[in-house]
Image: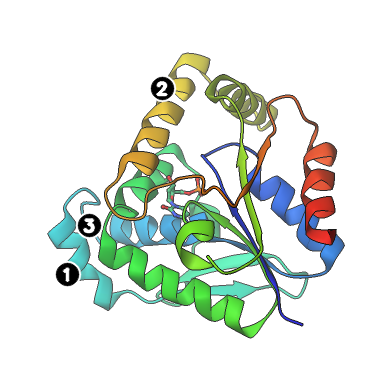
Amino acid sequence: MKYSIAIDGPAGAGKSTVAKLAAKRLNIPYLDTGAMYRAVAVACKRNGVDVSDWDAVRAFLPHVDIQVRYTEGGEQRMIADGEDVTHLLRTEEISQGASLVSMIPEVRDRLVQLQREVAHRQAVIMDGRDICTNVLPDTPHKFFITASAEERANRRVKQLLEQGQPADYETILTDIRRRDRQDSERAYMPLVCREDTVRIDTTDLTIEQAVETLLSEVRE
Ligand code: DC
């Protein structure tokens, strides 16, 4: 039977870590929909399109081809105009760019269509901001994974330092709060937690505990 698991939540709450592990245990693919918005931001940047200029992004959109592929090992890759851009997705500039392009209804409609096509073909676990509310509202498995902004900033600092990159807690906290505001206050398909959604606050949970909470709900 095809089934899907929908996860929403703010940036840096651990959604993708939890989703990836759960996907492995359930032996179904994981679709990171944030990566799709990031790929659009990368394509804009490469083509000199200003991500805050809605008309420019709208005019550009029909000319860019965005695809999701999986490696044999099951790893998701993002392809823009035939080129693998996965290694370019995880910078602060692209995080902010993705948040901006995701406000544009035409961008969302295009990516949501691709996301629904994936869920139509196979069982999948998908995370993002509007998966429970808009992309897969009919799945019984809906989750909202969150954590305090301070804890999310701490985790990001730790991650950057582990990668040998500079990290300033206050700057990161400000960025996280700005992105939270943009994602939850935008007019079209904002991030909200529906009533029929299981809320998992990971502030004081280990990754393993969060994964177990999700899987036990799914098994029920
Ligand atoms: O999950 P992420 O941080 O990679 O997402 C990047 C941005 O894309 C995020 O700020 C909001 C947007 N996004 C969205 O609006 N809807 C989704 N389903 C996924 C991401």
Q: Position of residue 16 (x, y in %)?
A: 65, 49
Residue that mark 3 sits on: 48
Q: Position of residue 45 (x, y in %)?
A: 30, 54
Amino acid type shown at disc 3: Gly
State the residue at coordinates (73%, 47%): 18
Dividing the picture into quarters, in which one does residue 148 lie? top right
> How far apart in space, not on screen, are marks 1 and 3 (Cα)?
13 Å
State the residue at coordinates (49%, 66%): 135
Q: In front: mark 1 or mark 3?
A: 1
Q: Nearer the viewer, residue 87 or 35?
A: 35
Looking at the image, residue 35 lies above or below residue 152: below
Q: In front: mark 3 or mark 2?
A: 2
Quadrant position of the N terminus in the picture? bottom right
Query: Earlier along the polypeptide chain: callout 1 or callout 2?
Result: 1
User: Residue 59 bears which disc, if any?
Assistant: 1
Looking at the rendered structure, the secondary structure element under dot 3 is loop
Looking at the rendered structure, the secondary structure element under dot 1 is helix
Amino acid type shown at disc 1: Ala
Dividing the picture into quarters, in which one does residue 39 lie? bottom left
Residue that mark 2 sits on: 174
Q: Position of residue 32 (x, y in %)?
A: 58, 59
